[in-house]
Image: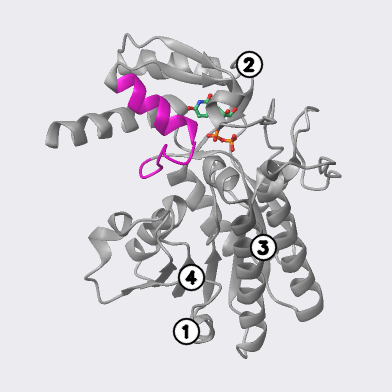
Amino acid sequence: MHVLITGGAGFIGSHLVDLHLGRGDKVHVVDNLSTGSRDNLASHLDRADFHFTEADIVTWPSLDEAVGWADRIYHLAAVVGVFRVLERPIDVMATNIAGSERLLRAVDHCGWRPQVLLASSSEVYGPRVDGCLREDMDLIVQADAPPRWNYAISKLADEAFALSYARTKAIPVTVVRLFNTVGPRQRGRYGMVVPRFVSQAVAGDPLTVFGDGTQSRSFTDVRDTVQMLDQLAGCATTDGLIVNVGGNHEISINELAERAIERAGSSSPVEHLPYEVAYGQEYVDIPHRCPDLTRLHGLIEYRPQWTLDATLDDLIARVRHREGAS
Ligand code: UDP
């Protein structure tokens, strides 16, 4: 199979590359390396069955050709990460929406119908607090929205484009709403909590909990996420569907901090920082986030193999190994 992965040098994309090359597929990655990195692909760069292009999805001249080559496309290229979204609210809207529309248009014009999996986000559920989040729920967009919600709005626009192309142009596209995904190669630089806590715990530094720490998330290991994405993309009945992808074991950020300290055998303290200090501006956090997985489990057999503790142990070992080597 020929697989095109936009944003394939990033955290989730690079794990998709591993999965498909491991299976004997040919893979082409396009990534502008804004948050992705060549290091994430280092072990594949010399392979004949792998091709990497450094380019922006919005302007890449060879997009049509790459789309025409592909049997399957994972569209992950986007401006991501809370810190980056707050810093670059215009880029988030412009790149995320234009990139998705350009890709879908290229698929429509390429003369045949590769399977497309378009990455959306649990952010589209906004600041809801009522139970597990279902794909068919009405969504709340905060009035007077500060740029904090631009990412969610850009992903909603992507979803609307994808479903419109599915309905009016018969493009086989599945929209996945990814919940908090964690694992190797995720960086803390753009805000993600798990790599930050792991590095802090290993270094013996204070774990910086933003707000009062009662907010909760459910985390999924990226190695499970990519298995689920692959099964969804290979599933005949997902065209034009939105599907939550994640796990549903919720944990508060305070508990997560304690867990990281415990697994690392660290004596780091926990420090609570007000949101204004953490994000450098007013910030509306999402108090709880947990997916309803009924639709996902009705479509695919795969169930996550990684527990949060196993992921934390693995990440802690990797940080220690890196530090030992440097
Ligand atoms: N968070 C935290 N300390 C950090 C980074 C993040 O307490 O060093 C909090 C953040 O405010 C949020 C949660 O952890 O409540 C998850 O943050 P992340 O950016 O990983 O994901 P998202 O907010 O998109 O769910």
In terms of secondary structure, where does tag 1 sit?
loop
Q: Amino acid at mark 4?
A: Asp
Quarter occupied by residue 165: bottom right
Bin the neighbour count of mark 4 within 10 Å (Cα to Cα): few under 14, some 14-19, many 20 and up: many
Residue 188 belongs to the span the image colors magenta: yes
Bin the neighbour count of mark 3 within 10 Å (Cα to Cα): few under 14, some 14-19, many 20 and up: many
| Cα distance in 3D space between marks 3 and 1 | 23 Å
Mark 4 or mark 3: name the one nearer the start of the chain: 4
| Cα distance in 3D space between marks 1 and 2 | 47 Å
- Look at the numbered disc 1 and say if its residue's Cβ is closer than 8 Å to ligand 1: no
Mark 2 lies on residue: 214
- x, y percent for residue 156: 74, 55
Residue 146 vertical placement versus 75 (above, below) = above
Asked if marks 3 and 2 touch (Cβ < 8 Å), the reply is no
Give the magenta-colored segment's residue range: 184-202
Mark 3 vs mark 2: in front: 2
Bin the neighbour count of mark 2 within 10 Å (Cα to Cα): few under 14, some 14-19, many 20 and up: some
Mark 1 or mark 4: name the one nearer the start of the chain: 4
Q: Which mark is residue 62?
A: 1
- Look at the numbered disc 2 and say if its residue's Cβ is closer than 8 Å to ligand 1: no
Query: Quadrant holding ligand 1?
Result: top right
Mark 3 lies on residue: 174
In terms of secondary structure, where does tag 4 sit?
loop
Mark 4 lies on residue: 56
What's the residue at 65%, 50% (across, down)? 151
Residue 250 in sight here = no
Mark 1 vs mark 4: in front: 4
- x, y percent for residue 187: 40, 41
What's the residue at 81%, 78% (across, down)? 168
- Is residue 200 toward the left or the right of residue 251 in the image? left
Mark 3 or mark 1: name the one nearer the start of the chain: 1
Q: Amino acid at mark 2?
A: Thr
